[in-house]
Image (spheres, helix red, strand yellow):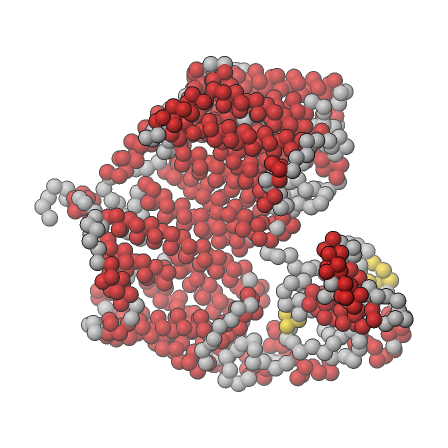
Amino acid sequence: MNAWLGLARGPFLYLAFSVLAVGAVRQWALAIGELVRAHRLAGDQKIPWRWMFRKSLGWIVPVNALAGTRIPYTVASAAFHIGMLAVPLFLAGHVALIRQGIGIAWPTLPAGAADTLTMAALVGLAVLLLYRLIDRAARFLSGPQDYLLLVLCIAAFLSGYLVAHPEANPLPFGVIYLAHLLSAELILVLIPFSKLAHALLFASTRIVWELGWHFVPGGGERVRAALGKAGEPL
Amino acid sequence: MENRRLFVFKGVMWVLAGLAAAVAIVRFTLGLGVSTALSDTTPWGLWIGFDVMGGVALAAGGFVMAAVVHIFHRERYHAAARPAILTAFIGYGAVAVGLLFDLGLPWNIWHATIYWNIHSALFEVAWCVMLYLTVLALEVTPTLLERTKFQKTYRFFVKLALPIMILGIMLSTLHQSSLGTLLLIMPFRVHPLWYTHLLPELFFVSAICLGIVMVMVESTVTSWLYRREPEMEMLAGLARLASVALALYFVLRVGDLARQGKLGLMFDGSSLANLFLVEMLLSTVIPMVAFACPAVRRSFRGLWFLACCSVLGFVLNRINASGLSQVWATRYVYFPAWTEFAISLGIVAACVLVFFFIQERFPVDPHGLAQVEAEREKLAAAPPAFAPFDQVWLGEGWRKATKVYSFVFVLALALGLTAAPKAEPTLDVRAVRAVGATVLRVGPGPRYVYFDHKRHQDEAGGAKSCATCHHLHQRGDMGTPCVVCHGNIFLPTSIFDHEAHVAALHGNASCAQCHGKGEPIRVTPVKKCSECHDKDLMAANPIVKTFDSRWAPSYKDAMHKMCIPCHQEKAKDAKLKLPNLGRCGACHDSGTQSEKAYTAEFPEKATAGGV
């Protein structure tokens, strides 16, 4: 156990942060390439920049989407995302570890607030998972990755809560601590290489989407060719 | 369908480049000591042997082919001239980069241009390599300009080509041989089988041989990767040429050994003699004999294999001459760290990638370029496909390449960063740890001294003095060396054994005993050691101060805070007559330039005590 904890706290943690750092640089470099390409493909240069940026930024605010049709889903998603951003970054224990390691620190959440946010995120994650399992359309669109990432996030939050509340923890402390470290490190490693990449790319994907909806000249023909229906009318 | 063979090969090159990039970060931030196995005894390692000595020789194809085609007008080798010159250009660039890695102060690399030491062989090498790199750049320029709109400039460089090439051949002759000259100053260090007054001549002739076989390797590998028809006629001609050059080298080298009466040394069975035999067989004897057979010259695989074998042998020769052959004199076995291999391979990989990049865009080999361009057009016109694993299409051609290669590159980079050595911790070397009650181990080696416990006890003040040495009361503690708490010279270290406390206090339920009930488990809201271990830890003695910490200070801080105040105090004591006791130099190297500068600046501190 101690050997594993040593690995998880040393080399694995280092690897996770290195992968995240260099992977993020790669994703951003590729994103800039895609932005340039989308701009070029847009063809007509009358792009409503201001409207486009406002619309892209608007997607960050969950309230905007509350007016939509899937209100429970939106609330669950917002609860999870707020917890996911606030708790790992501003938990007092994490900040203390970071100060120990590299000597910088920042303000932290009060313990009660961290617990509340963790609970909210866990409930949100459960709702999101149930939604994927129950809703027909969502189930049809989901691949293994979608379920695995949700389970991974649940594991990280749950084990994190138990690490912070050892009196509520039925398992040996080391086991749950190791589970927390490994699940969190796996999340960090997966951020640049899976659907979690939206954490890095949410801005640029929206902008590319707004820019690039203009099709490539002759794009329709190529889609038909790919579907094996060349020459047929649309 | 694109060329999968080439795609995978380039992917492997990107992985190697990624690893090298990680090591490069470590090397330039933490220095040579951390990132290599080099030492003061063996300051020249793999990087000098392979990257610099080998690199210069591997790039010799440029001047050899320039001479064959443009001076001796052997037109059938014309197709090989441009790739060879391009390889030479990239190769010399790589030598410069490799040198930057090996130089302790890489930012001083320009010094040879200003600070002239005309007695140094390295001075000559430095100037020749710089000039030749410039010449090679001028030689490569027409290739890059040929298909652009700058036709006037292109014609200017074409006219310039012949004199430039003559200059290039001259410079190559000079520095290929002076790399051998470099070793002439070490007659007692280089093994007799390699040391001879003919080292410069041997280096020059072997560079010609290596140049020819390297062109063969390049041509065969390129035609295999790009699935092109190999140019067998040219390869066969080169093989015949190589056979003659290798024979010349063989006669020169063995004849020189015979002249010095060293032939017997070859077969004395020592490891270096065997290394010499392997080197000669690989580089010279086997290829020389095989290339003379017409049947081998008709076989594509045979030519490829033998050329590779010879290249390997000659690279081994450079590594031997500049490194391995000196082991018998230094008695110090150096084996490169993996980081050194990573840099060497990574530089080669980067060179290969640059070569491919230029070859696929500029008319290095016009026929091959036409083929590449035709394939590229075919790909652009192909309908989009769905990727097999996630149904997300990566794109084709450069878009797919960018995504896949950057993926493998960053993965290798991250792995390399994780595996690369970190700042070196202070080991037990700095401490003297007792291994028994009466025997002390001294340092890391098998050296022991008798330890008289009773005498120490008496001299330190009897029964009350135990804590002077045994101040931590750890289990099995035979006196606590500094290193137990202050393990790393730079970093704060933990002396607190958490697992032992958890076990002693019976598991999870006990967390609250130290961390407080209802509080999340953190480092900060926790009991101080002294709250439970007041009597155990803290001793009334002049050395061990009462410290309030769950975290030991770094070695440096501990020593400074522990020793300096008392030293400064004693320095003021006129009776002791030790006015310098409080200065840095009392413990550190005394009389250094920096200390002189410091005492000149702050004369009052020079007597009162250091920082």
Q: Is B490 displayed left or right of A173 in the figure? A: right
Q: Identify the residue at image location x=41%, y=57%.
A: A24
Q: Please provide percent x and percent y for residue B302.
A: 49, 23
Q: Quadrant of residue B369?
A: top left
Q: Identify the residue at image location x=21%, y=48%.
A: A43
Q: Please provide percent x and percent y for residue A58.
A: 27, 67
Residue A40 visible in image? yes
Q: Is B492 displayed left or right of B352 in the figure? A: right
Closer-to-camera residue (B62/B462): B62
Q: Is B276 displayed left or right of A226 in the figure? A: right
Please count the marks in the image. 0
Q: Identify the residue at image location x=23%, y=42%.
A: B383
Instruction: Give above or below for A69 relative to B82.
Output: below
Q: In which quadrant of the rendered image does the C terminus of chain B lie?
A: bottom right
Q: Is B246 displayed left or right of A206 in the figure? A: right
Q: Identify the residue at image location x=40%, y=45%.
A: B405
Residue B239 visible in image? no
Instruction: Give above or below for B379 relative to A28.
Output: above
Instruction: Give above or below for B194 relative to A17.
Output: above
Name the residue furthest bottom. B517
Closer-to-camera residue (A11/B137): B137
Q: In which quadrant of the rendered image does the N terminus of chain B lie?
A: top left
